[in-house]
Amino acid sequence: MKNNDARSAQELRQQIDAARVPVHVAVIMDGNGRWAEQQGNDRISGHLHGVQPIREALTAATEAGVKYLTLYAFSTENWNRPKAEVDALMELLVRTIAGEVDELDRNGVRLHAIGDLDSLPQGCRTALKQAMDRTARNGRITLTLALSYSSRWDILRMVRGIATDIREHRLDLHAVNEQLIGQRLSTNGLPCPDLLIRTSGEQRISNFLLWEIAYAELWFTPVLWPDFRKQHLFQAILDYQRRERRYGLTSEQLPAS
Ligand code: IPE
Ligand code: IPE
Ligand code: MG
């Protein structure tokens, strides 16, 4: 089974048009709890099994030539889950980041994070900072973890920052444009996602990158996150390459590809 998976991943990868790979892929990693429940285990075991798929997604993205991979790992709303689950997730986060940093560095991955990082436990902040510092000069792919992140949190922060700067006469109202808004969001420096993937069959955005996905292609799969493998990322990219991104124009107006 494993060998078949690897072969089919390889075959799919070869079908990808290297000239039209999405630059930025964002993923809502969903379904850990349901996966665990299906196995008769507690939700936390689903989160533990959600780590290997992250390695797979990162490897597949790197192999395909994706330059930015952004993973929704913990939302602002997820703080409201039972304390034992939140604690387990935070502990898993520290352990995973600390355990993976060498491998990330070896593979040319730059680790980055967005969200209300100050709200994370001290151990998480330290592990994150160390891993980000260590990998800061890598350029093969940027892996961004969205942690204690929600898009409305980010937009609210951005609006307050702009309003304050206008009030203090540091900013002119007429200088507020789409570019400035993008620069004031926590995703500043990342291009907008070209492709947004959500696993687990849910077809919603759950407060992720609302501004940034204005023209992203959406790809939903019933696969639960712990079952996500390289082949699924390649499938998503191939599906993306079959689409026509028109940005409001007609097909005829688009440059011939
Ligand atoms: C995604 O899986 C992981 C996080 C949100 C942290 P879930 O834990 O949401 O799994 P389901 O959706 O309950 O199955
Ligand atoms: C979205 O999943 C958040 C993450 C994947 C981190 P949720 O499971 O929290 O989203 P809802 O509750 O199904 O919308
Ligand atoms: Mg969920």
Image (cartoon, helix red, strand yellow):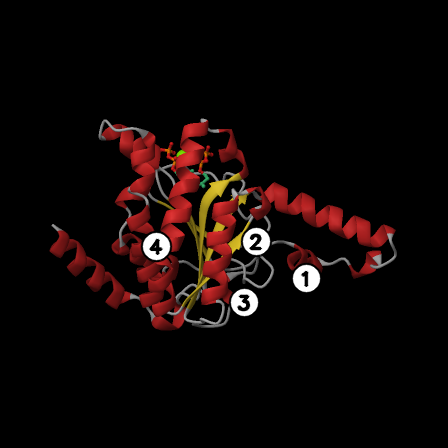
Element carrying mark 4: helix
The first of marks 3 and 1 along the sequence is: 1
**Dot 1 crowding, Cα within 10 Å, few <14, some 14–19, many 20+:** few
**Dot 4 crowding, Cα within 10 Å, few <14, some 14–19, many 20+:** few
The first of marks 1 and 2 along the sequence is: 1
- Looking at the image, which is closer to me, 189 or 220? 189
- Looking at the image, which is closer to me, 215 or 102? 102
User: Residue 217 at what x, y percent from top left?
Assistant: 45, 53
**Dot 3 crowding, Cα within 10 Å, few <14, some 14–19, many 20+:** few
Determine whether label 2 and label 4 are within 8 Å by CB: no
Query: In this figure, which residue is indicated by the disc labeled 4?
Result: 99
Query: In this figure, which residue is indicated by the disc labeled 2?
Result: 212
Quadrant of the image where one finds ligand 3: top left
The first of marks 2 and 4 along the sequence is: 4
Q: Residue type at mark 3?
A: Gln
The answer, for residue 199, to whether it is visible in the render is yes
Determine whether label 3 and label 2 are within 8 Å by CB: no
Element carrying mark 1: helix
Q: Residue type at mark 4?
A: Gly
Mark 4 or mark 1, whichever is nearer to me: 4
Disc 4 to disc 1, how far (Cα)?
37 Å
The first of marks 4 and 3 along the sequence is: 4
Q: Residue type at mark 1?
A: Gln
Query: In this figure, which residue is indicated by the disc labeled 3?
Result: 253
The first of marks 4 and 1 along the sequence is: 4
Q: Quadrant of residue 182?
A: bottom right
Disc 3 to disc 1, how far (Cα)?
25 Å
